[in-house]
Image: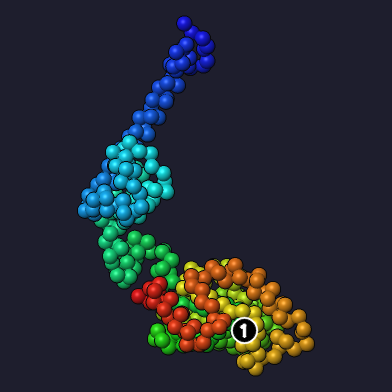
Amino acid sequence: MVSNVMKNEIVTFDGKLTGSDTSDILDAEDMTSSFLDMVGERVREARSRKNISRKALSEISGVSQRYLAQLETGSGNISIVLLRRVADALDYKIEWLVGEEDPYSSKLLSLYTLYKQATNAQRMKVLEILDSDHPNLKRSRRIAFIGLRGAGKSTIGRLTAEKTDLPFLELNEEIEQASGMPVNEVIALYGQEGYRRLEKQSIERIVATNDSLVLAVAGGIVSEPETFNYLLRHYHTIWLKADPADHMTRVRGQGDERPMAGNPAAMDELKSILMSRETLYSRAEIEVDTSNHTLEQTLSDVVEAIESKGYLT
């Protein structure tokens, strides 16, 4: 006896669904079961290849043996968080456990393992073959210091160049050489727009003629999106940070009294500039705080960061 008829499905008095919707539900259940079986098999095989027991995997991942047993037999719908921990413990990428492509059958895992074990020089050669436009290749061994005036870009830049046996360039000096006049005259004659155009041309020329160098750029370069994006793509960038008071003290220590001369609001303006540019400066790959640090400490932090990132290998 039929109680209700609704488009493509029939509900009987015993509460069971019949019709096409029942078929859809069964298909979905089959797909879920097959998926869980596949994930369980891959976890089991990965554990076997790593030659660790389920107990050891439980201790490394923090996932209980009961959960692992259910996972490996396809009978447990484990959470994504716990599955991620299992993948990490197996030195696996979680997408390898749940993706359509089997990492073993595609030799993806063996390639990944070899790449992880390779030296930086070997990895760069692989990138040259597989991805000639990779950012690491574009940046080569070029390092650029960014930051507000008085951050120490010129001083730390020169010392870093000496430590790493690289040539050092001051971008404004390159602009002066290209234009045949001091920067302040360039700005007076061509305006800020003319200066920015020469700035971008100089950065591009340096890339074309130098694979290895340390460059110090003006603080306002981050305000020019096209130029700054080019810098980020072709140079490893380091932001030298400092407190506003340190910026002001260092500029005045260089004999430049202009920031404070006749301008009692100079410090407030400096803080405003620093705040407005902070998000842009933070796009640098490395940040080094120079406040409350000696010159030696700052230089050590910079060189250590460069070495740990493998910028020169």
Where disc 1 sits, the SS reads helix
Task: Please give the residue where the numbered disc 1 appears in the rendered image.
Answer: 246
The residue at 44%/71% (across/down) is 139
Q: Is residue 24 shown to the viewer in this render? A: yes
The residue at 77%/84% (across/down) is 263
The percent coordinates of residue 69 (x first, y second) are: 29, 42
The percent coordinates of residue 35 (x first, y second) are: 34, 37
- Nearer to me, 62 or 181: 62
Q: Is residue 48 left or right of residue 1?
A: left
Q: Quadrant of the C terminus?
A: bottom left
The percent coordinates of residue 277 (x first, y second) are: 63, 71
Q: Residue furthest bottom?
A: 255
- Nearer to me, 18 or 132: 18
Crowd band around label 1 with a 10 angstrom C-alpha radius: few (<14), some (14–19), many (20+):
some
Three-letter amino acid code of the residue under disc 1 = Asp
The residue at 52%/12% (across/down) is 5
Where is 266 relative to 255, above or below? Answer: above
Where is 150 relative to 38, above or below? Answer: below
The residue at 49%/72% (across/down) is 286
Q: Is residue 46 shown to the viewer in this render? A: no
Where is 292 relative to 26, above or below? Answer: below
The percent coordinates of residue 258 (x first, y second) are: 71, 88
Q: Is residue 227 left or right of residue 303?
A: right
Q: Is residue 106 left or right of residue 279?
A: left
Q: Residue furthest top?
A: 1
- Nearer to me, 103 or 218: 103
